[in-house]
Image (tube, coloured by chain):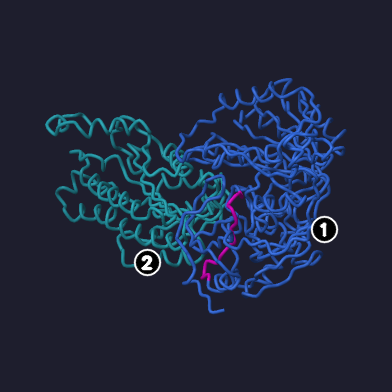
Chain colours: A blue, B cyan
Amino acid sequence: MGATVADMPADTVSVTGWGRTAPTTARLIRPRTYEEAAAAVRDCGARGGIPRGLGRAYGDAAQNAGGAVFDMTGLDRIHAIDADGGTVLCDAGVSLHRLMEVLLPLGWFVPVTPGTRHVTVGGAIGADIHGKNHHVSGTFSRHVLSLELLTADGGIRMVRRGTPLFDATTGGMGLTGVILTATVQLQPVETSLMSVDTERARDLDDLMARLVATDDHYRYSVAWIDLLARGAEMGRAVLTRGDHAPLEALREGTRARRDPLAFNPSRLPAAPAFLPEGLLSRRTVSWFNDLWYRTAPRARTGELQKLTSFFHPLDGVPHWNRIYGRGGFVQYQFVVGRGQEDTLRRIVRRVCEHRCPSFLAVLKRFGEADPGWLSFPLPGWTLALDIPAGLPGLGALLDALDEEVAAAGGRVYLAKDARLRPELLAAMYPRVADFRALRAEIDPHGVFVSDLARRLGL
Amino acid sequence: MKDAFGIPQSLLVLGGTSEIALATTRRLIARRTRTVWLAGRPSHALERSAADLRALGADVRTVAFDALDPESHETVLGKVFAEGDIDMVLLAFGVLGDQARDERAPLNAVRVAQTNYTGAVSASLVSASALQSQGHGSLVVLSSVAGERARRANFIYGSSKAGLDVFCQGLGDALHGTGVHVMVVRPGFVRSKMTAGLEEAPLATTPEAVATAIELGLRRRSETVWVPGALRVVMSALRHVPRVAFRRLPI
């Protein structure tokens, strides 16, 4: 003990989320030990603190204006791997990238990965992330057996599945405390390659029909959707679905067969720091989308892809978020339940009519929900799209979409949000009252607070 | 907190009866703003402005504030900030004066300078320091195109705005990196009760147009906003016109 905040590396810096909107200034504190983390929490000052991982949340979830932001990436040790049972005990600051590097050679893979592997385990639990396998495997926290939580009093609690604190913490956006370690159940794999089936859907209804009919045959499934196509082609999409390739899928004598569990992601040069706004205009994105759709195979099965190009194509370009220029971008992701297909169609139509230059729109069918109180997924449909923040009329459009989503019993994803109206929060997350009550109990002085929490009154 | 588009949830207006300020507030309430503080000299007009904004659904409170009493600024504004974060401060008070009369009555001229300049310096410094300890927030200051170059017809007002403009540019630079954003707004001739009866200048604009420009400036985190935008070009040309010629221009 004896660690104080003064000993720790700390800088006053401007912090934003991955979308690079709404910067605020905070003291960035980088604890190197659990004791330092506890000291940082105890001494964080009147404007509180919030843990931060690799900053991939799009909005203001890991910002804390005028207060402290705990950069947890310094605590990144992997403590124990059970190579037979397939569990890992690691610090919350470990990235999924690091876990893949270490675990793949042992024949294990993370149970859930989002569209980037540059997220920490702590962030994955805090945002209760999902991946292309949600319809089969649920969220990340479904595979977390237990975690250690540093709470507002500076104490460390072991939190087990099925307890209220666990369900408040999974999806709790770091507001219940700082996750220090987690024990995660892993997914066995024979190779580091993916066997992928690709097909095209000519419009939104065709897409939904295909997803409903055959999604359950695949562990991983996602559809890339062209939101700039109009008329009869509205909602046209490319579906990519697959599973980890079994060893026998690799041809004898190939390098892949000799080293089936190799993990070697490729990287292009990073996006330059200063790019003009408006690079992604309606015209350029429309060309890109058209090209993407037309060059995709009409139907192809069993293609072997590198794991990283299947799961994390954007990680190939470091700092890809800079392509939106200084003004940044907004990611809008919502879910509506099964039976709300009409709402989904209406929203897709409105987005198309607004001509949002979105080149990363993704549609996915979610499976069963997990118990996290603020966990995002619901059984149904989720659509995620990136839009330049400077698009005229965007704020009003998204507000209107929020109304539709809320009226249909759906919700928007807090890890991506930077603009929701606080009035809609309780309708979207019915358990937010329990969440607030639990926070009032374990953190009566409001030590843990973020810009997201201030904006939405979490 | 401000959202991804820079729209504040809470707003403090200094000069709560200013038409530009009220047009801006209406616009922001329509988007996100829920808490509004109208600061100004207690008056019927101030209460009426507050009532109008309440009708739009915002939680509006008034606070007694006098630009000419800088000694009280810290206390008065301190109380507002103590109630919760303020995402945006709109410094909108100012008086136009009557150039011809004020030239003959120096005390009146001093009053214009004290309101528009020293009062604003004090209020901006107090606000800026509170915003800085929050680590976020915008200070939006209504300057004027009149401060860009002295004109025979309104140089008393113009000089006070010139002082304010330069002060706020410097303040913006001083606060760079603290999370506080200072935006200087330079409208041209705005049709409002302040300019009622005056002869309209070219490129005249409206309070609503200024409000729109402010909303855009917040989204872009602009440091200078001209309204209308064309004034930027016009003024950068006029700035270089020789004095001999400028005096004779019919503006």
Could you say which is closer to the camera, residue B126 or residue A411?
A411
Residue A192 position in % (x across, y down): 74, 42
Would you name the residue on which mark 1 appears?
A84
- Amino acid type at image mark 2: Glu
Identify the residue at horizontal 18%, vertical 47% (top origin).
B101
Which mark is drawn over residue A384? none
Relative to A211, say whether A68 is above or below. below
Residue A422 position in % (x across, y down): 63, 53
Depth check, mark 2 against mark 1: the one in front is: 1
Q: Is residue A55 magenta?
A: yes
Identify the residue at horizontal 77%, vertical 34% (top origin).
A253
Residues indicated by labels 2 and 1 sit on the same polypeptide chain: no
Residue A223 position in % (x across, y down): 74, 34
Pointer 1 local density, CA inside 10 Å: few below 14, some 14–19, many at least 20 = few
Range of the magenta residues? A44-57
Instruction: Answer with left or right where residue B191 lies relative to residue A331.
Output: left
Could you say which is closer to the camera, residue A9 or residue B102?
A9
Which mark is drawn over residue B74? 2
- Amino acid type at image mark 1: Asp
Relative to A197, say whether B59 is above or below. below
Quadrant holding the C terminus of chain A:
bottom right
Relative to A279, say whether A78 is above or below. below
Task: Quote the CA–CA distance across marks 2 and 1.
Answer: 66 Å
Instruction: Answer with left or right where residue A138 lies relative to residue B245.
Output: right
* Quadrant housing residue B144: top left
Protein chain holding label 2: B
Provide the secondary structure element on which disc 2 rests: helix
Q: Is residue B242 magenta?
A: no
Pointer 2 local density, CA inside 10 Å: few below 14, some 14–19, many at least 20 = some
